[in-house]
């Protein structure tokens, strides 16, 4: 956006990220005083804030440092297209969204005066303010230079406020939220950001989806530049862009008011009954940005459908999706849910690219070792280690009991099997000797998986405990599952506070771990339990497996509800551990600069990202295998789907030979 915008320099940079302010004077338009007026014939009966004339809003927007480009109306609200984004006026609320270096918060005082003076709205029901982290914070004005200053400003002006941060606070996709409720009817439980997202539940009174996209493709950027040979800019140009890009097809039945800036940039407001959506695009190549926001009910397409349409149109390298849901439950309390999904963008460059494989040597793309395999269980360590190979690890080792080694070797020649472990009833070595033998392997490894097929034999567990200690000394990532979790349940101190550890409990294992860590497991708050358990373990990453998977490091929570198969095979959890291990190995290679990248991912992010990617692939393998084999599907069938599932979820068909991006 360059036409009369508030931040444009010779370097052509513009702060595309919007500040969003919502001020509600009641929960519905029927809840405010009935003061109405009949305007011109082309404008419907209006009430509340819709009584305010255009010149009053113009004066208020001068404070914000933006202006009105166009206005459209329907029976429910007025939609103002601004030089820096959008404003929506309902009888009972105002939604003001501005980008660049606008001074949105400074206008709150005047907004409250207008509501009181013109509409007799003297009591605020709710205020909500949010924004993404700025790319150019130094260019912001007033309190907008710093989130803490914004919070201070809001706290001084309004009562009962609460501030929240969603995502990594020093990352480029962090989300800042401030909201209040003078009537104390908003409740935001800690870590409630993973509340199950019901895409069809009509009981939710208000659902808002916001998609923020950066690093748009060159082809996409070119579409939002004005080409004089095609016609005028402004509203005519906006209508032309709508058809060229397919933006008019997101909600085909909506009234769309769009604008093409000169020489580039695009904004649009959409009206669909009493719901809205808006789109804003900053196509400058060194700061490309696009946003899409809507509160159109899910009956007009599922949330996933809308997200897919938008992402397909803009083709961003990175994006985040935030879903805000306001619901009335039996206690008349409000719940807000913020779900950030910028995972795919953060996984970019995390794996070795196919185009660079020729310069790698054996083992650089991952050396994984599974500690497990006993008389009773030989399939689990095989599933785990072989899954690591099928995803792309170069080498996989299994350290097991001698009797298990024969069986595991017979499954495939691709695994390196070491018969080092001993049971209590056949011990010809001490546990210390076993641990020392395994310790000799550690310098060759990138990641260790502990637990598949381990058994609960006393000596086997003692050996595993010692191996974990040796691995920690080498700073090796650890993935712990199955009987390894039984060990942790009885000796949590051996893993507590180790940031490179990932625990992958199923429902029963998760409850036992919660009991051991003195966490009261509550079914009605199960979505925050992974975060609480991680906090109890001082930052160990928890992968809570279930109907949907929850992943937490105690600071943030990822939810994985990708569709899986209809049959839950024994051994599926072992596949997951192998996949996590390979992604963790790639994380080590990433930070060792095995290939060129922009170093966007910090070491602390890798366990969360590795777990997320592994969970999505496991679910896709299950879905794909079940589609082929139905009820007869087995874990071995799922393993055969790993390569294609990874390609479907995380590889783009347009990759060039030397491209190293997902």
Image (cartoon, rainbow, N blue to C red):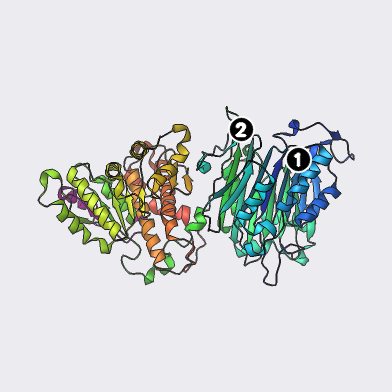
Judge left or right: residue 483 versus residue 208. left
> Where residue 578 appears, x then y in whole percent?
33, 52
> Where residue 351 appears, x then y in whole percent?
42, 61
Question: Is 411 part of what is drawn in magenta?
Answer: yes
Res 454 quadrant in image: top left
How many C-alpha atoms fall within 10 Å of the one at disc 1: few (<14), some, or many (≥20)?
many
User: Of helix, strand and loop, which one carries label 2?
Assistant: loop
Q: Which residue is mark 1?
A: 90
Judge left or right: residue 525 versus residue 592. right
What range of the chain is rendered magenta?
390-414
Q: Nearer the viewer, residue 580 or 340?
A: 340
Q: Nearer the viewer, residue 359 or 450?
A: 450
Question: Is 650 part of what is drawn in magenta?
Answer: no
Q: Nearer the viewer, residue 465 or 410?
A: 465
> Where residue 628 appears, x then y in whole percent?
40, 43
How many C-alpha atoms fall within 10 Å of the one at disc 2: few (<14), some, or many (≥20)?
few
User: Of helix, strand and loop, which one carries label 1?
Assistant: loop
The quarter of the picture where the N terminus appears is: bottom right
Vertical side of 443 occupied by 154: above or below: above
C-beta proximity under 8 Å, tags 1 and 2: no
Mark 1 or mark 2: whose residue is earlier in sequence: 1
Q: CA distance from mark 1 to mark 2?
A: 21 Å
Q: Which residue is mark 2?
A: 202
Q: Closer to us: mark 1 or mark 2?
A: 1
> Where residue 619 appears, x then y in whole percent?
42, 45
Residue 309: in sight, yes or no?
Answer: no
- The residue at the point 54 percent across, 46 percent down is 339
The residue most toward the front is 156
Residue 413 bears which disc, if any? Answer: none
The residue most toward the left is 428
Res 529 quadrant in image: top left
Residue 438: in sight, yes or no?
Answer: yes
């Amino acid at each position: 956006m360059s036409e009369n915008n508030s931040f444009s320099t010779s370097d052509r940079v513009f702060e595309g990220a919007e500040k969003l302010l919502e001020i509600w004077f009641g929960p519905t338009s029927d809840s405010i005083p009935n003061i109405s007026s009949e305007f011109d014939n082309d404008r419907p009966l209006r009430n509340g804030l819709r009584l305010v004339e255009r010149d009053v809003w113009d004066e208020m927007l001068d404070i914000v440092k933006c202006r009105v480009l166009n206005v459209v109306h329907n029976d429910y609200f007025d939609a103002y297209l601004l030089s820096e984004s959008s404003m929506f006026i309902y009888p009972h609320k105002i939604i003001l969204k501005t980008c660049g270096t606008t001074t949105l918060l400074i206008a709150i005082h005047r907004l409250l005066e207008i509501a009181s003076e013109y509409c007799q709205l003297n009591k605020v029901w709710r205020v909500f303010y949010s924004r993404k982290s700025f790319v150019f914070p130094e260019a912001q004005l007033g309190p907008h230079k710093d989130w803490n200053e914004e919070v201070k400003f809001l706290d001084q002006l309004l009562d009962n406020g609460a501030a929240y941060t969603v995502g990594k606070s020093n990352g480029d996709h962090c989300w800042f939220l401030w909201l209040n409720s003078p009537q104390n009817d908003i409740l935001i439980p800690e870590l409630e950001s993973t509340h199950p997202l019901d895409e069809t539940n009509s009981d939710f009174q208000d659902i808002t989806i916001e998609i923020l996209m950066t690093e748009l493709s060159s082809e996409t950027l070119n579409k939002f530049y004005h080409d004089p040979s095609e016609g005028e800019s402004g509203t005519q140009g906006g209508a032309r862009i709508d058809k060229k890009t397919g933006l008019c097809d997101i909600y085909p039945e909506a009234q769309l008011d769009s604008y093409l800036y000169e020489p580039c940039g695009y904004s649009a407001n959409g009206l669909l009954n009493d719901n809205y959506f808006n789109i804003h695009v900053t196509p400058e190549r060194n700061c490309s940005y696009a946003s899409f926001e809507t509160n159109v009910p899910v009956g007009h397409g599922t949330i996933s459908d809308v997200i897919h349409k938008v992402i397909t149109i803009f083709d961003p390298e990175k994006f985040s999706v935030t879903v805000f849901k306001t619901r009335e439950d039996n206690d008349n309390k409000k719940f807000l849910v913020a779900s950030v999904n910028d995972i795919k963008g953060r996984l970019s460059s995390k794996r070795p690219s196919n185009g660079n494989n020729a310069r790698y040597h054996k083992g650089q793309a991952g050396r994984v070792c599974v500690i497990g395999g006993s008389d009773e269980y030989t399939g689990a360590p095989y599933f785990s280690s072989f899954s690591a190979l099928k995803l792309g690890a170069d080498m996989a080792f299994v350290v097991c009991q001698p009797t298990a080694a024969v069986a595991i070797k017979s499954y495939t020649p691709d695994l390196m099997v070491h018969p080092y472990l001993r049971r209590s009833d056949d011990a010809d070595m001490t546990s210390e000797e076993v641990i020392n033998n395994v310790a000799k392997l550690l310098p060759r490894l990138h990641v260790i998986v502990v637990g598949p097929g381990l058994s609960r034999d006393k000596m086997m567990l003692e050996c595993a405990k010692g191996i974990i200690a040796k691995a920690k000394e080498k700073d090796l990532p650890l993935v712990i599952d199955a009987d390894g979790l039984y060990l942790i349940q009885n000796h949590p101190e051996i893993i507590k506070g180790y940031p490179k550890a990932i625990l992958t409990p199923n429902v029963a294992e998760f409850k036992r771990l919660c009991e051991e860590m003195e966490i009261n497991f509550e079914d009605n708050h199960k979505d925050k339990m992974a975060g609480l358990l991680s906090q109890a373990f001082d930052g160990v990453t928890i992968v809570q497996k279930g109907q949907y998977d929850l992943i937490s490091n105690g600071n943030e929570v990822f939810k994985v509800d990708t569709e899986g198969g209809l049959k839950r095979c024994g051994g599926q959890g072992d596949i997951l551990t192998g996949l996590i291990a390979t992604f963790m190995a790639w994380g080590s290679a990433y930070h060792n600069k095995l290939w060129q990248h922009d170093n966007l991912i910090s070491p602390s992010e890798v366990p969360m990202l590795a777990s997320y990617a592994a969970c999505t692939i496991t679910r896709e393998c299950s879905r794909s295998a079940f589609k082929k084999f139905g009820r007869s599907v087995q874990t071995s069938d799922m393993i055969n789907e790993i390569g294609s599932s990874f390609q479907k979820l995380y590889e783009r068909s347009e990759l060039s030979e030397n491209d190293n991006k997902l």
